[in-house]
Structures are given as C-alpha cells and as structure tokens.
Amino acid sequence: MRQREVCPVVEAINILGKKWHLAIVHFLFDGPKGFNELKRSLGAISSKTLSKCLKELELQGIVKRKVYNSPIRVEYSLTEKGEELRELENALRRWGEKWLLR
C-alpha cells in the first residue's frame, strides 16, 4: 500500500484555518498580550474558546505562554515559528484591502 503524501498547504490550513487562530496571531504581532487583552481585541470570542485556541496554538509551537508570579498573570506571545506567519498575514491584508474594502 502506498503511503499518502503530505501536502504542506493542507497541513497549514488544518492548523491555521480554525476559527480564531489567525485572528489571535494577528493581534499578537503587536507584542505580548494578557488573556483579557486578547479577549477584548477579539470581541465575540468566549473565554472557553479563547483558552482552547491558545492551547492548540501553543501545542503547535506558534504561541508561547509565560506565567508571572507577582502579581500572578499570564502573557501570550508568538514564538519564532509564529513570527514567521507575518508574511502570510501581510498577504492576507493586501488581499483584503484589494477585494473586501471597496
């Protein structure tokens, strides 16, 4: 039996194509953010959904989580792998400006 070839585009879409994932990455391009700051930026996302998305992005090595002890707070930022999505975000922005903001 032949092994199925992995398509990098399909694999990337499986990770980044989930609702909210690219939006979270977009807001983290501005720098590290706390959970509530991200939630405010995203608007209509529930805390449960945001938490789940952040965990998924962390497992994929796109987002990193840092816990501070005094006062206790959590901050999310992009990893090197996540920062490399900037080119994709710029391409999506250009496409949106050209085709969606008319």
Image (tube, rainbow, N blue to C red):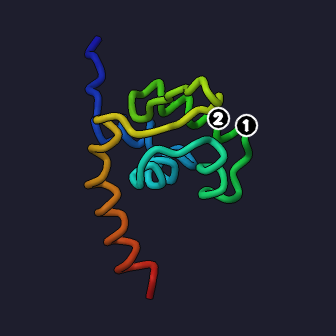
- Asked if residue 47 lies left or right of residue 4, the reply is right
Q: Which of 28 and 11 is in front in this view?
A: 28
Is the residue under label 1 in contact with that under label 2 (CB below 8 Å)?
Answer: yes
* Residue 95 found in image quarter: bottom left
* Residue 43 found in image quarter: bottom right
Q: Which amino acid does label 1 sit on?
A: Lys
- Asked if residue 15 lies left or right of residue 88, the reply is right
Count neighbours of disc 2 (C-alpha within 10 A) and say few if under 14, some if 14 to 19, many if 20 or more.
some
Give the CA distance from mark 2 to mark 1: 5 Å
Residue with the most extreme front position: 70
Residue 16 image point, x, y percent: 44, 43
Q: Is mark 1 on a helix, strand or loop?
A: helix
Count neighbours of disc 1 (C-alpha within 10 A) and say few if under 14, some if 14 to 19, many if 20 or more.
few
Q: Nearer the viewer, residue 70 or 22?
A: 70
The quarter of the image holding the C terminus is bottom left
Q: Residue at x 73, y 46 (%)?
A: 46
Task: Establish if 62 lies above or below 100.
Answer: above
Q: Which amino acid does label 2 sit on?
A: Ser
Residue of label 2: 51
Residue 24: image tag? none
Residue 75 image point, x, y percent: 53, 36
Task: Establish if 43 lies above or below 7.
Answer: below
Q: Which residue is drawn at 52% across and 45% down?
A: 33
Q: Which of 101 and 48 is in front in this view?
A: 48
Residue of label 1: 48
Residue 53 image point, x, y percent: 58, 37
Q: Residue at x 44, y 37 (%)?
A: 15
* Residue 8 found in image quarter: top left
Task: Establish if 93 lies above or below 73.
Answer: below
Residue 14 image point, x, y percent: 44, 37
The quarter of the image holding the N terminus is top left
